[in-house]
Amino acid sequence: MVGHGGLTVGDTLFVFFQYLILAYFVFICCSYAILTFLGLRSILHYNRLMSPQTIRPLLQSRAYRAISILVPAYNEEKSIVASVRSLLSLHYPAFEIIVVSDGSRDATIDRLREAYSLDEIALTAYHAVIPAKAVKRLFRSLLYPNLIVVEKENGGKADALNVALNLARYPLICAVDADSTLDVQALVRTAYLFIEDDLTIAVGGTVRPLNGAVIQDGQLVEIRLPTGWLERLQIVEYSRAFFAGRAGWAQMGILMIISGAFGVFKRDAVLEIGGYRTNTVGEDMDLVMRLHKHYRRLRRPYRIRFTPDPLCWTEVPGDLKTLRRQRNRWHRGLWENLWEHRDMLFNWRYGAIGLIGVPYAWFVEAVSPVIELGGYVFLVVSVLAGFLNLEFAFHFLLLAILFGLLLSLMAVGIETLLLNRYAYLSERLLLIVSAALEFFGYRQVLLWERFRANFQVWGKRGQWGAMERKGFR
């Protein structure tokens, strides 16, 4: 069959698909460039705003808002004691820590009882404002009155957070993963944004890989690069995602996710929308999207912000099997939330988040594995069929790799130079090497896992999978 201009239908489809991939690539490059520019601008502004002269008066004044730290834990015996010790050492005038063991089958509770002299208290102290799985036992530390520990039936991370939310007494809540540790000034730097602007209802902070760092008495005393290349590659990936991604989205007022590893919210705002939804593995993204919907529907002014400095250090997977399982879960969580909130897609009622943020998440974040993998298949088929202009293909791939490398190097530069992390020159050079190596195998493995996740969303709905932990150094 012959089309217009003497081209067969197959030739026409080939040319169309070729231009489609090129247009998609150009769109993504432009998007990333804009987000990177906005993110860098916000980081420079934040560095000027949050000087020591700003922090010190806040610690000494009564302008602060007390914070309840919510820590869901499932089989975290290796790191839970060090994690809680880190939280107890935070520089903040008034806070409480609520650790919820979500049906742990290991010695999580035993480790906490040994380390913090837990005393069992009556269950009458617990009132379920938000429905959740049954609470078995409540404890309060004899050494630290602001430490509460809960043992409950297994219901998942979101259910554990709802139990902690029911117990929380303070106007701000901070959700922190049990395998994480916070910078000592993380709370005061985040809380400042709530004081600065009363319309702020949520603030997300930067999450960084902990692997390789040294923890002493619950505090991070030395930031070192991990020995494994897999973990080094994740450092580059995290830098790019937070500094060139979320910082940029927050500048446009359409941040759609605050990492479950570290985020601070107004307690009343979270209670208004019914707490955390328990039937998704992406409860962190779902919470933020429901906050957007709730405030937009009520036409109430609000702000959801991101700050690059309040650091949460978390353990990232050290083996490929666990990493693939994690990324599969993340991508399934993305699809679950996009489908749950599909009414926001191109909906002017939700402003920029409905017209820009949600469509971007659908057609770039969610669909990109299918298009990118399709591009690889198209490349191979074209070469085998003799259709491809090899010189054009070479320059196209080279441009794609160099542009991605530029974004990664900018993120690494922010990490090491602007924010002055990884003090050793050898470690900074290794991060630059990692940024280059990311495109040769690592990216393709995760691309395949995200591609598989597109077709597992409903079959594995709500399934987390086991995450192997090594614990802190």
Image (cartoon, helix red, strand yellow):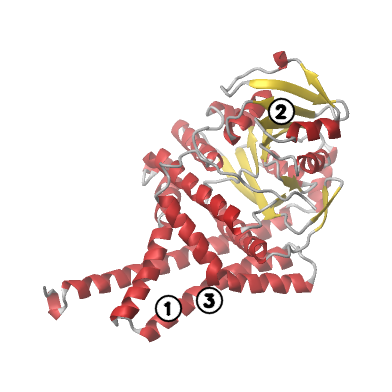
- Near-viewer residue (323 or 388): 323
**Label 1 vs label 2, nearer the camera:** 1
Q: Which quadrant of the structure image shows residue 192?
A: top right
Local secondary structure at mark 1? helix
Instruction: Tell me the distance, in whole angstroms, between the alpha carbons under discs 1 and 2.
Output: 54 Å
- Near-viewer residue (312 or 158): 158
Query: With 293 as the anchor, is 36 left or right in this view?
Result: right
Q: Is residue 131 above or below residue 102?
A: above
- Near-viewer residue (50 or 423): 423
Give the residue type that dot 1 points to. Answer: Phe
User: As drawn, which residue projects farthest toward the left?
Assistant: 1
The number of callouts visible is 3
Residue ID for mark 2? 170
Query: With 334 as the anchor, is 223 left or right in this view?
Result: right
Residue ID for mark 3? 402
- Mark 1 or mark 3, which has the lower sequence index? 1
